[in-house]
Image (cartoon, rainbow, N blue to C red):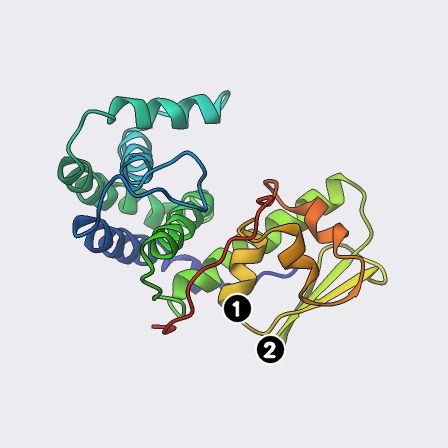
Amino acid sequence: MRGLMTADDQFAASAVYLRCIERVTELASSAQVSIPIPACPGWTLHNLCSHLAGNATALATGDINPNSPQEWIDEQIARRRSHDTSMVLTELADSGTKFARRIAREPRRWAGIVYDAIAHEHDIRGALGRPGARSDAGIELSLDFELRLLARHARELKLPAIAITSGESSWRTTAGPPAALLRLDDRWELFRVLGSRRSPMQVRSLEWSGDAHLLLASLHTPPPIEDLIEPLGPCT
């Protein structure tokens, strides 16, 4: 599948990441930290900020456990459970700045972490009812990552091709005639769909030709059972 981002755009990933953590810090610093995050069942705002800060600190220092990623994520949150959220946000800002230097050196290697931060920023925005940053360059970078991941999973599962059209752009997961075609011009909504932030019912309600199950089966994580409703709002 042909990606969205050029080589020059990839090298802007560190700046995209820094802007993201700045926005997250601003959002979280004035919010109730015990508020639940509907897009991340079982997590509060404090948990999500701990995840982002833990990622930044661990990856900036090379302290990662690739053999057990979920256990590693859980450990990052557990370490910060008793920390004040303001302390966690300070850690995020400090470690995020250091980690951004690694992103600048190897943007493709860390594309998934940049995507994770951007996706969680919008999880926070949805929980707080504060939409925004929907036209940020990070959305296009995230779509590039999501589309590549979707294509890889579709190939691994030997699924028929899925075609996706958005505005003037179009992509196909694999070679051959598409068995399903999705038309979705709203790039931010496509970003949320491909990031498993929409229920199967929400995905099936989109503009389809063919079987929406092919896309649902190709997502990198299972979609939520219940509809995730996020506020309408400004793109900027």
Q: Are marks 2 and 1 in contact (CB under 8 Å)?
A: yes
Residue 165 lies, with reference to residue 213, above or below; the image says below
Badge 2 marks a residue whose secondary structure is: loop
Residue at 57% x, 44% y is: 224
N-terminal of the pair, mark 2 or mark 1, is 2
93 on left or right of 114: left
Residue at 52% x, 57% y is: 192
Residue 2: quarter of image: bottom right
- Image quadrant holding the C terminus, namely bottom left
Residue at 68% x, 50% y is: 151
Residue at 14% x, 36% y is: 87
Q: Nearer the viewer, residue 19 or 60?
A: 19
Query: Which amino acid, by three-letter code, is at mark 2?
Result: Gly
How far apart are labels 2 and 1 at the CA level?
Answer: 8 Å
Residue 56: quarter of image: top left
Percent of width and height locating residue 186: 54, 72
Q: Nearer the viewer, residue 10 or 188?
A: 188
Residue 58 lies, with reference to residue 137, above or below; the image says above
* Residue linked to disc 2: 167
* Residue linked to disc 1: 187
